[in-house]
Amino acid sequence: MDHVDVPDTDGLSVLEVEDLYNAALEEVQKACDVSERQRCGQRLAVIAKALRAAKRKPLEKTQRTEWSAYPEPVTLPRCPDDARYVKSFSTEVADLPAAQHFFHEYGFVVFRDVLTAPECEATVAEIWRSLEERTPGLERHDSESWSLLSSERYGLPEEQAVFTPQIVANRQNDRVYAALDAVLPRMSGIEDFDSPHPDPNSVVVTQDRWCIYRPAGDDASARTAENLHLDVNPWTYAGLKPTEIEDLRYGMTIAGDHRFPLQDFRAELTAVQGRGSSTGEHVQGVLNLLDNLEEDGGTRVVPGFHRCFMPWLRALGDMESNLAQSGQHDNWVLRRAAGGGSFKFSNLDRIHQLSRRIPMRAGSFLLWNQLLVHGSCANNSANFRIAQFITGFRAGEMSPGRSWARAAAVQRHNSGLLLRPLAPHVFGEARGTEGTEGTAGPADGRSFARSEREHLAVEQVLQTSKGHPEAILKAFEDFHVQCKPLLHVGPMKGTYLDHAVQRSSPSLVLELGSYLGYSAVRIARLLDEGALLYTIDENADNAARAEAVLRHAGLSNAVVLHGTLEGLQSQLPRPVDLVFLDHSKALYLEEIHRLEEWGFIKSYKLRLRIRPLCSRRWSLLLGILLGLSRWNRTISGQRKSTGYVPKGIFGRLPDRRSERVRSWNLGAALPAEKPASIDLRAKLRDWACHFVAESSTLRRDVTEAANVIMKPRLLVGSSRKFVDFMAAGALACGFYRFCEFNVRQKDADAKAKESYRLMAERAEQLLEGPTREEVISVLREAVDAQ
């Protein structure tokens, strides 16, 4: 088919577009053959669409008065050694004057080699780990799974601020600080400086996010949205409207104010009230983590717009005339919290012709004046675009109350993370001895940095949720993802718990292990009228926290008890309809026997479900070790009688193992620094295939498993083969734990470092000996009972 020639209708009036439509219609009527008529018809359809859009557009806005204030188009200087990239500068003192001149001329500047290659790789790896953990099925090296990445809007994570080790380390980087310090206007004449930051000119960094654009190529559905905007409300920035930025308390409990703290970090970016100067008080930035070429998508700016900001604002008129958006033709201001906002430019605005992409190398730091119109371009290449956002401003810009409250919140979220010498400047040092407004300490006077994560989690849940069970569950999950990991059920496993409650419709439920009340809330919210939940925890603090959470949720059908099952069993009604075990797994078998002996349960069914061990791509094999600890009760006795202590999967495998396991020879194959060199994926896959071959379906649908390595559904054929699968899962989990806590996280505690041995011991028990035979026997009984 011939190419359809469609005229450009941007900037044309309705009458002019209508003339084009009439001419196109006449061409269709005069067309002689089918192909010509088809071509003319396509052209007519495109112009008709443009005409409909033009008629929806107010006539007086076709040509905007503020366009006359726009800067002239420019050609950006390129790097002398590689013209694919925009000119960049180093953070060395000798190069700073040239960088500052460039910044004042264009409104932006690129600093190169701000992050080293290892720092870029570590940040990218951390982002991918976060994505894989929260997105089931997503794997960095599996292109077929990339469709699970968010690409509908801007490729951003859900949370408003990210606090993970490498992200926080980048905020304290010496060269990041030097770049921000070079372009921010310095402050002087500040008396009685009261701040957690050591100096009014300390560079404070914002707690922002990262972004990831997946490769799109010709797939338009995979591209992120294109846009141009300002991250300020122009009228409040110019001082024409007030903001509440100095009233931000970042989630502190003040007069019943329970605002979510991460929202305040976002508000401080958009609620800035400047002095109408050409530089402003904030400098925005993108820390580039991969080489980013023109076609890879990413940041674009309108060079020089910072110099015409005030003439442009005067041409806009008052803010009230720019609040409405009747369609894509209107520019408009989006008002946000604390009096802040952002200004959105329509896709038809002439300013798009003035924007310029800023391609740059990995490790580069792009900074721009906050008054510079900027946005992003879609990724049209086969490469990823990954970056971290960092904004900076001077400590002297903040009021004392806001400064102390902010430092307290940052210290709270950075708790447990490595702080560097620049931490007092970029984060501030919050006071931890007072519980008053604007200080770091909670009501009991403890510093946030010294508070345990459980205390912080419950405090945030009580402050940020509105007393509804679903809101409380979401608040726990937000804390787990955005602040500190919790040992709670979580939303994914929680769905299985929900199904169990809904399926059994219990009148009386017993939970052993309350922790912070998350699972108790999940259970109690689903109970029928008149049903009751008893939840027990031997930790007094956790029992009190769980009780506070359930009371906040308004769930009166749950009773929290402090103690042990043995100590409280005389106070509990029996029998119960449902028991949820959620504490030390080594005690599960003992607890089940006690529950039977004391009449809490009359009988129970063994239900097995194969599920992923974890979402990491090198977990490799589906399988859940559900109930393995039930069969661990004889371990201690076996060791005493035989004198044998298992060496684990990374010592020399015992000779008494079966030949197929010894042939793996994992211990001999494991280099000290590079455990990934073992082709464990292939070995586990081959072993799994060996046991799946010639298998028949068990008479239970719960034995179906979706294997993440091989993709198809696997059906386990016999009890013995099922146990072999469990052993393979234990070995895979042990390999994960060894790599994670002995190689990747070398600062992990001793218990975590040794945890892989437990998996090795379980694998040994399942491969040979009395425990294996006992497991097989229980499995067969369970199958026969169906």
Image (spheres, grey):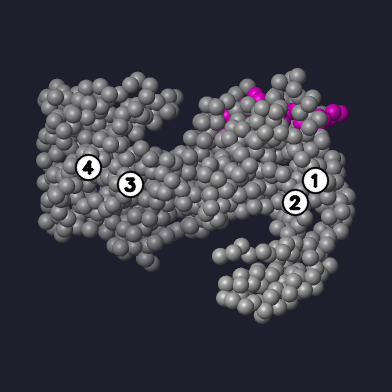
Residue that badge 2 annotates? 353
Depicted 61 relative to depicted 190: above or below: below
Rate crowding at label 2 as few (under 14), some (14 to 19) or many (20 or more) other CA atoms within 10 Å: few
Q: Quadrant of the C terminus?
A: bottom left
Q: Earlier in the sequence, mark 3 or mark 1?
A: 1
Which label is found at residue 708? 3
Depicted 731 relative to depicted 98: above or below: below
| 61 relative position to 747: left or right | right
Of residues 624 and 717, the one drawn nearer to the viewer in this rendering: 717
Where residue 781 sits: x, y (%)?
Answer: 12, 52
Q: Which numbered disc, 2 or 4, marks the residue closer to the eye? A: 2
Q: Earlier in the sequence, mark 2 or mark 1?
A: 1
Where residue 719 sits: x, y (%)?
Answer: 14, 47
Q: Residue furthest bottom?
A: 29
Q: Secondary structure at mark 4?
A: helix
Q: Secondary structure at mark 2?
A: helix
Where residue 435 sits: x, y (%)?
Answer: 64, 37
Rate crowding at label 4 as few (under 14), some (14 to 19) or many (20 or more) other CA atoms within 10 Å: many
Residue that badge 4 annotates? 688
In the image, what residue type sits under mark 2?
A: Gln
Residue that badge 1 annotates? 73
